[in-house]
Image (cartoon, helix red, strand yellow):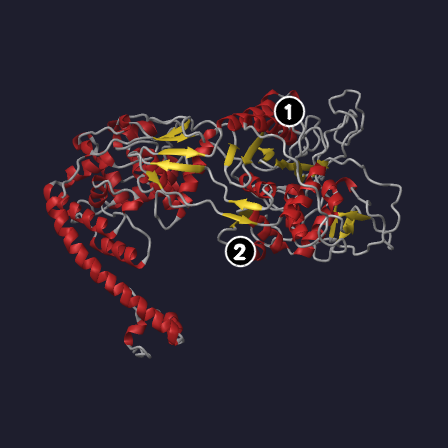
Amino acid sequence: MRPAGPDGPTDFFRDDGSPLSRAEERRRSHETPKARKKRRRRRRIIAGVAVLLLLTGIGTIGGAFYFTNVTLPGQLPTPQASTFYYDDGKTPMARLGASDSNRNVVDIDKVPERVQYAVVAAEDNTFFTNSGVDVKGTIRALWNNVTGGDTQGASTITQQYAKLSEDANTAADRTYTQKLKEAVVAVKLDQKYSKKQILGFYLNAVYFGRGAYGIQAAAKVYYNKDISKLTTEEAAVLASVIKDPSQDDPAVNKKLAQARWEYTLRQMTKLGKYDKSISLANYPMPKKPKANTGASFGLDKPTGFVVTQVINELARNRTLSDASTYAKAREETKQRLETGGYKIVTTINKKAEQDAISSAHEVMNGDQEYKDAQKQNKHRLATALVSVQPGTGKVIAYYGGDDGTGFDMAANPHQPGSSFKVYSLALGIKDGISVKSLWNGDEAEKFDDRGGDGKVHNSDGEHCSDGGMDAQGHELCTLSRATVMSLNTVFYALTQKLGKDKVLDFAHQAGINMIMSDGSNGKPAHKFDLNTVSAQDAVAQGGLGNEIGFGQYPVTPLDHANGYATLAAGGKYSTEHFVTKVTDSHGVQVQLPKVKHRQLFDASTAADLDWVLKQVAGNERQKIDPPRDQANKTGTWEWPNKEGINANSHAWMCGYVPQLATVVWIGRKKGDGPIYNMWGAPMYGSEYPSYIWKAYMSKAVQDLHMPPQNFPPPVYGGSKTAGQVASSSPSPKPTHSTNPHPTGRPTNSVTPPGGWPPGTGTPSDGPSSPTCNIWDPNCKTNGPGNPNGNNAAPDGAG
């Protein structure tokens, strides 16, 4: 027998009346008086709301029964496509939705029995025997609404059609009164119409995805057939999609779709309507969906990725849905946009977007050197470009590839290499470390916290001695010079000094929302949403090491672009966003969340940061035409291939002027692996990514009417003795100084511990800059990337 406890027997029941488990009982028995009081108060509130719900419900039920009419399929509102506009609010960019021709009403007698039972099996296998209302499910949904649980939809087919007929398929209307009303409509349906008629209503109204409303339209869109020609297996595919058209479409998630298909056939077997063995070998794969269905356009172009980002943003912010999960919110948001006739004004500037696309195409499709490079790569190369307005967070241009229905390279994570060093540098300056502070500039350095031999290496044996030598014969390098030369050793030491979790937290505050662990250090690879997981927990759970300071762990170009925009804005962070205005079909403006801003560091930190990164932008390949103050950092990540010859797998060019920040990434179109330049040598960020960055920025600053602005002069703040080496009186400089004009080449080669499938490398900084123009046939620099003697295009910033 259960003990009464200090508050009586009710302490051993949950708020919903169900008994507690033994573990829950033990926790309750140790509650503090304050916690017990809070729980009792919550019960009283819930009980009061339940009474109010009951009273309100009685009125709702009565009113609904006498005044609500059932809407038939032919009377349902015509779906209206939503239009997405450029930032001027006038020029259409894309349209999403189905035309009215994609709703074809057919008589239930013309729907084969196999098709009818496939839908019944998938959605409501007791349809022909139930009362039309799932009483338990409805009460559970009402209770969840009152207690703060998930907003739940209809359950039986009759209730689902009642929901459709009441035009209550939007989350904004998923209140308990609406659910009660739907239940009443379902009862009226069941009283007035036969089960066969109700099923006919449902089959003609329900959404199957791909812009298809009703079973006839679905048969055409998925199999290009009339419903009379559908096989049982094909009908099961269509029925399986109804639950979640955005995810259960086999073109989206084949594995999930096939699992739903198997479930549907098993239910049909139980109903005695399918007697074959269930095998995936018999799965009838539908035809590939068209990007622009019905009234849609612009979805199969680069702007299709912008539409996807808009949907994601509206779903994250619950602008058109109040679902408790992001997946459900996204499904509801997409469906509302496909049918609701919304007008969405985006942040995308048409000229800037065209500049991004044309710049990528000029290099990828029109540049002979790039074409030759493509021949050196077994896998096709891809690029991404994202441009953000500093101080506002507006995404001005977005290019994730040419096919907006494919894989978005700008939204997927890639190893940033040395382009990530800007966050370590900015945090160091902010925390009082001078850009003139001294660090070990040797070509390699051993660190006790690393695996293997513990050594971190600089790319190509690079070393720096602009600060002289110490008493032990180690070269000394200033932090500014180490950044320009992109020395991994210095940035590993800097991250170690600052704290890797602090560096990640700073990067997050600047704009990095997601980071991916790489499977090293004995931890499985995992994506961390830094908006829900703290940097400290991400570091611990992902086994992230100090290599985070020089870009070992993948981030998205979208996040990275906004991070650079924060630097360009003098430390002012603004939430990146694609949407500025949403208006419904009645002209009513939908409320959007305010853009968040925060000041991450002060003007003196910004001045010193700009001064350092301005030195990186010394290569003609990345200089904006005509010249102006600009800040840059390249990034490259090494790929140790099977032959043991180092290659690079990711190449970046990132940078900004005061009014615009842009990042460019190049890597493989599919999978991960080595990428090569026209000579078959490793590709660096100062090559093709720089060409694209320069081409785009040179056009964009003109088209966006951005006159040249100078960076403020450096203040050389912080402590010069706060570096790795505290000596303020170094020995005289040796005669073997490094190249005085490095170009931010791909960084060093540090081999992280463990190894990341499919391959772990290091930020790689390539050969030094040539002193002559690379296009000059007489430029014989004997760069290691060019077997013929011509320099293989240096990259200085790793």
Q: Position of residue 99 (x, y in %)?
A: 30, 27
- Going from N to C along the chain, the mark reached first, 1 or 2, is 1
Q: Which residue is mark 2?
A: 534
Answer with left or right where residue 142 lies relative to residue 517: left
Q: Nearer the viewer, residue 796 or 569?
A: 569
Q: Where the C terminus falls, by quadrant? A: top right
Q: From what the image shows, is residue 465 above or below residue 692?
A: below
Q: Residues within 10 Å of mark 1 (few under 14, many from 20)?
A: many
Say whether residue 589 is left or right of residue 740. Answer: left
Q: Percent x, y for residue 88?
A: 44, 29
The answer to which image quadrant residue 35 occupies is bottom left
- Say what amino acid the circle numbered 1 marks: Tyr
Disc nearest the viewer among 1 and 2: 2
Residue type indicated by callout 2: Ser
Q: Position of residue 100 (x, y in %)?
A: 27, 27
Residue at image position (77%, 20%) is: 777
Residue 556 visible in the displayed image: no
Mark 1: which secondary structure? Answer: helix
Q: Is residue 479 visible?
A: yes
Number of the label disc, if any, that sits on residue 124: none
**Viewer-side residue, 195 vs 774:** 774
The label number, if any, that marks residue 370 in the structure image:
1
What residue sits 33% from the left and 26% below the top?
294
Count of number-bearing discs: 2
Nearer the observer, 744 or 193: 744
How dense is the environment of label 2, judged by Cα within 10 Å: few (below 14), some, or many (20 and up)?
A: some
Secondary structure under tag 2 reads loop
